[in-house]
Structure formats: structure tokens, C-alpha cells
Image: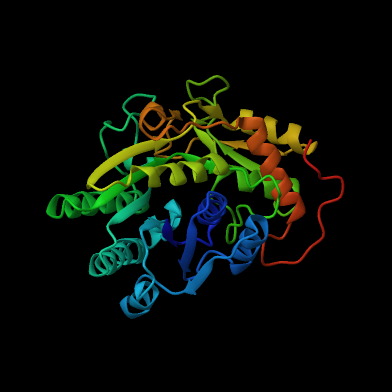
Amino acid sequence: MNVLVTGGAGYIGSHTCLALLRAGHAVTVVDNLANSSPVALDRVRELAGRELRFHRADLLDPAALEGVFEGAGFDSVIHFAALKAVGESVEQPLRYYRNNLVGTLNLCEAMERHRVRNLVFSSSATVYGVPESVPLREGARLQATNPYGRTKLQTEEILRDLQVANPAWNIVLLRYFNPVGADPSGRIGEDPNGIPNNLVPYIAQVAVGRLPRLNVFGTEYPTRDGTGVRDYIHVVDLAEGHVRALGRFGSGGGLSVYNLGTGTGYSVLEVVQAFERASGREIPVAFGPARPGDVAECYADASLAARELGWSARLGLDRMMEDAWRWQSMNPGGYGVPGDAVQGASAR
């Protein structure tokens, strides 16, 4: 297939581009580089041994987007491009609604003009809000609790309405849980701007000395060790899920929804211990009270993806942490800051 990947220079996007190229697909990336680096795409090309096309453009610019589509002959689109920090979305809701919703509307209008009606959308487990029960199934109640999550949920609703209005559209909504890890080469990985919002890159930056300690919020949850439990999925497995989703596109239209997760929950302390095993380094931890809105546990039922996509997560927690550490130790400053690998930092 000839695939357009929006936000393809980002963390999940770059790993998906690599998986697509290795699967034989032609790949074009459009990204405004607001929270990503073109270095990631250079490394994707290097790892795949194949070329991809790149347009630096913003989905909020319809004219630039039209230039991406003109004469390109895309078969399908995988849509990652979005702002994605929960806390920032609470502080800047209008920015999030404009970027994530208007950008998607512009993309779908360009797709319709060029008769490209196969779309894989990068949704999120945040659409479920506070789980009523676990494991979470695709039919669970949707109740996003922050502006970021609501942009994902509202985008899902927009795409449902679009597919009802024009049944020729083929749409796959992928709700994934907590992506972690990196390509085993250590050449591409997660490089957040500023202080990481997610657990594993925060731990990794503590391990290389960029941050002094990990703050753990909540120690009295009804879980194995009192800390919160989440479903962490290796980004390589997640990327493969997007490749498999392209296989849903046949001659007829439709809309499908799939959870992508491992189906297993790991606590914060279990993740810390796995990272310490991988790195051989102690992670200093400071404990504090639970934050409002945090839940005790959240993990997926991904059996539908196994049945209909032939996909299931293969890589466990230790492998996730080994690959995350390899990436961070080989790139202590991320993509944008040159630096030598951390001494004695090869993953075990």
C-alpha cells in the first residue's frame, strides 16, 4: 500500500513507519515537528534500508495539506498527529480542541477530495475514563475525563458520523494503553519535550541522571503493592498492530474498534524493579499521596484484536524496560542533544 502517516516523526509514528517499510509498504510522512524530530525519520530510513517521503506541514494548514495529497495516490492514512499531554490539555483546552479536532477535520476533507477513504485512527484508552471494571472491553462506557481524552473521543464520534454518511469509508479506531520501550537497535525511541509526563521515560531520565528521583503518587491502592496498575505495551508490538489494521481495508466500507494492550497490568513498583534489572541502576523513589482522578488499575481485554486482526502483544515487561534503557543510554540527550552513550549502560 501507499500509506500517508500523519505525525510520523513522533514516538509511535516513527516505529510504525519502520514497521510499514519493513512490511513492504510505501510511506509518506506529514509532521509539523512541534513535538518530534526529523532525526527520527533519518534513523527510520537507516534501519529499514528504504526511503520514505517527508512533508513538514501542519494539518491546520489546508493548503499545505492539499499539496501533500496532490498527485500522491495514497491508498490509506494512519493518523497520529495530535497534541497529547493530559495535564497540558487541562491548562490549554482551546489549543487542544483546535489542534486535534480541526486538524482531523482538515485531514478527512482532504481525504474525501482525493477519494482516499481508508483511515486508521490513533485513539487511546483515555476515552474510557475511570473504568467501571477491568479488563476493559471495546463496548465499555466511554467517559473521557480531560480535554485530551475528550478530543480522542470526539474524533471517534466524528469518524463514526463520517462513515455512516458515506459507507464507502473504511475506518479502524485503535485504542491503545501505555506504549513504552523502543526499537531494539536503540536508534529510535521516546524523546519527550521537557519533563516527561509518562512513567517509563521519567524513570529512564532518572537512570541517566537528568532527573533526581521518581515521584510515586499513591501507595494505598487495593493492588498487589499499593501502587497503581496499568497495561504497558511495547511500542514495537503497537506498531505491528497498525500494520495489521491495514489488512481490514477491503473493497467494502465499515468501522471497527480495537483495544491494543497486553491484557496484563503492572504496578508502578513492578515497572521500577524491571527497569532496575535492565539497567543495573537503582532508581531513587519518593512517595506521595494519590492524585485526584487517578484510578487503582486499568488494563485491556485485547482478545478482539487477536480474533479479527490476528494481532497480540508478544513482548513482556522485562523486554520493554531493556529496550527503553538501551534507547535512553545510547541517546542520553534524546534526538536533539548530542551526547555520548552512558558508560556501562548496555541493557542486560
For the residue pair 244 and 159, the one nearer the viewer reads as: 244
Where 66 falls versus 120 (above or below)? Answer: below
Where 245 falls versus 272 (above or below)? Answer: below
User: Where's residue 244, x and y in %?
Assistant: 43, 42
Image quadrant in which you'd find residue 4: bottom left
Image quadrant in which you'd find residue 40: bottom right
Q: Is residue 12 left or right of residue 322?
A: left
Q: Residue at x 46, y 46 (%)?
A: 243
Image quadrant in which you'd find residue 37: bottom right
Query: Which of the image's four quarters has the C terminus?
Result: top right
> Is residue 124 something one can see in this rendering?
no
Number of marks in the image?
Answer: 0
User: Where's residue 337, x and y in %?
Assistant: 71, 66
For the residue pair 165 and 261, the one nearer the viewer reads as: 165
Where 234 falls versus 55 (above or below)? Answer: above
Q: Is residue 19 left or right of residue 248?
A: right
User: Coloring scheme of the render?
Assistant: rainbow
Where 303 falls versus 207 (above or below)? Answer: above
Query: Which of the image's four quarters has the N terminus?
Result: bottom left
Q: Is residue 332 left or right of residue 166?
A: right
Q: Residue furthest left?
A: 165
> Is residue 348 something one can see in this rendering?
yes
User: Where's residue 261, x and y in %?
Assistant: 46, 34
Q: Is residue 239 left or right of residue 112?
A: right
For the residue pair 266 and 215, the one nearer the viewer reads as: 266
Q: Residue at x 51, y 30 (%)?
A: 228
Q: Residue at x 33, y 29 (%)?
A: 137
User: Where's residue 21, x and y in %?
Assistant: 55, 55
